[in-house]
Image: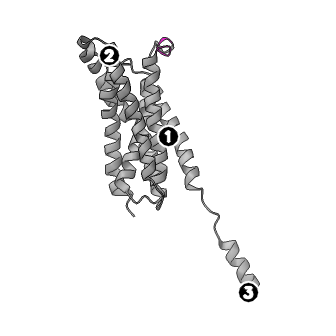
Amino acid sequence: MDTNKLVEALVADIRKPGPSLAGLWWTAAVFATLLAGVVFFITLGPRPDIAEAAETPRFLFKFAVTMALATAAFGAARALSRPGSDWRHTMVYLIAAPAMLLAAVAVELVLVPPTLWGTRLVGTNSLVCLTFIPLIGAGPLVVFLAVLRHGAPTCPRLAGAVAGLLAGGIAATFYAAQCIDDSPLFVVTWYPIAIGLLAGLGALAGERILRW
């Protein structure tokens, strides 16, 4: 075989490059959101008075918080999946959702009489919140862990935890459409616990399956 034929054979043997990691993340985000939506509508569905609730600031604010968390976690997870990337600066954006929520709690404490603080905090659906946010977010968490395995995270436990936050943010956004407890006192108490369960599960999974 002469040199030209050898080169041609080698070129023909080169496999086409796979999808980019950035493309996989965006595909995963869409798929995970659709998956969470399917689980949500099968198991819960939106609250009956959602049209009226959508005209109230407390109801809309829940979505601002959960979507801020999901957006920040998406950026952090993408950065953590790439070795050598400066992922630390992306972690700063994760503060946005808690800061927004704490500010809303401060306003709530001013506007609501102290005698109602406990009632607003406990709410009526805390068990539903703790059950269905992890349930809705379980599928998205698996999707995001799979994308992280396609990458090469140098901090597997942290990457898994952030994937859990991302899944939790998506799940909480859907659950907020059903939750009738709109007070920031309820949201600041029960939503973080439910999302934290997914983050903890993601951290444990990341420690086991994301090491390389």
Q: Which residue is mark 3?
A: 3
Q: Which residue is mark 2?
A: 110
Report the amino acid beneath label 1.
Answer: Ala
Q: Which residue is mark 1?
A: 32
Residue 146 falls inside the magenta stretch: no
Nearer the viewer's eye, disc 1 or disc 2? 2
Report the amino acid beneath label 3.
Answer: Thr
**CA distance for labels 3 and 1:** 49 Å
In the displayed structure, 65 sits above or below 30; it is: above
Q: Tell me residue 143's x, y (percent).
A: 46, 46
- The disc, 1 or 2, on the residue closer to the chain's N-terminal end is 1
Q: Secondary structure at mark 2?
A: helix
Q: Is residue 136 visible?
A: no
Quadrant, the N terminus: bottom right
Q: Tell me residue 70's x, y (percent).
A: 46, 38
What are the residue bounds of the magenta stretch? 52-56
For label 3, the crowd category at 10 Å Cα-Cα, with few meaning under 14, some 14 to 19 and many 20 or more, is few
